[in-house]
Amino acid sequence: TETLDAGFLVRWLAAVAEDVDREADRLTELDSAIGDADHGVNLKRGFAAVTEALAKEPPASPGAVLVTAGRQLISTVGGASGPLYGTLLRRAGKALGEDAEVTRERLAEALGAGVSAVSQLGGAQPGDKTMLDALVPGVEGLRSSYEAARAAAEEGALATVPLQARKGRASYLGERSVGHQDPGATSSALLFAALAGTARA
Ligand code: ADP
Ligand code: MG
Ligand code: MG
């Protein structure tokens, strides 16, 4: 099977940064309905810092790329999503260790460990209308293929619309959070779309 090196992971995160830039207004708009209208701005700042850090000193292994990216997100994003996405990537990076190349299956396993850490940090479960509603099916899909991951995460994000938020700012709205797509689940779907795009390129 094909393996992924540090360069692949750097290209993935650069693609995420591009997608976040392009979708920033939409993410902020979703956050204005059930949050504080800063999700696009938060992630734009965070992934710009990720891209800059990776360009300045390209890490030697896929694991090191993810650890560096996670650290940047934690230190540059003020909102809840910074520590959560930062934890996702840092924990996944640690799970990959220092191997120069990894398989898709191992990346899925590592991101699975990252998703567990996100759940532990934020106390949310799937169904609570958070990023986990896209991350959990996305990682599960990644065990079979990049395209399955992209489709499952997208579906998971869309499925947050009828849910009532039980974690994060949106939960303050109670029943009024119903009928809106969760911004974090939407950005999580972008992560898997960018991954599938990078794998196709
Ligand atoms: P903030 O809410 O601090 O302004 P953002 O707007 O950047 O942060 O991110 C909001 C997103 O973070 C939500 O849409 C949700 O997906 C995610 N989120 C918030 N709290 C949690 C949590 N406890 N667990 C998982 N995800 C969460
Ligand atoms: Mg917000
Ligand atoms: Mg905020």
Image (cartoon, rainbow, N blue to C red):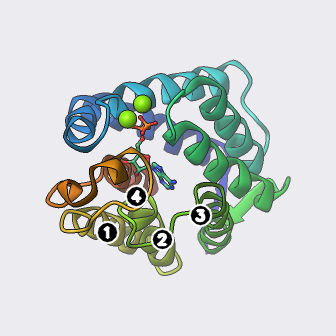
Q: Which mark is residue 156?
A: 1
- Answer yes or no: disc 4 within 8 Å of ligand 1: yes
Q: Nearer the viewer, mark 3 or mark 2?
A: 3
- At label 2, the amino acid type is Val
Residue 26 position (above or below residue 9): above
How many numbered marks, from 0 up?
Answer: 4
**Percent x, y of residue 73:** 60, 33
- Answer yes or no: disc 3 within 8 Å of ligand 1: yes
Q: Nearer the viewer, mark 3 or mark 1?
A: 3
Mark 2 crowd level (few <14, some 14–19, many ≥20, 10 Å Cα): many
Q: CA distance from mark 3 to mark 2?
A: 10 Å
Q: Which residue is mark 2?
A: 136
- At label 1, the amino acid type is Gly
Q: Left of 59 or right of it: where is 106?
A: left
- At label 4, the amino acid type is Thr
The quadrant holding residue 118 is bottom right
Q: SS class of the residue under badge 4?
A: loop
Q: CA distance from mark 1 to mark 2?
A: 8 Å
**Percent x, y of residue 50:** 58, 29
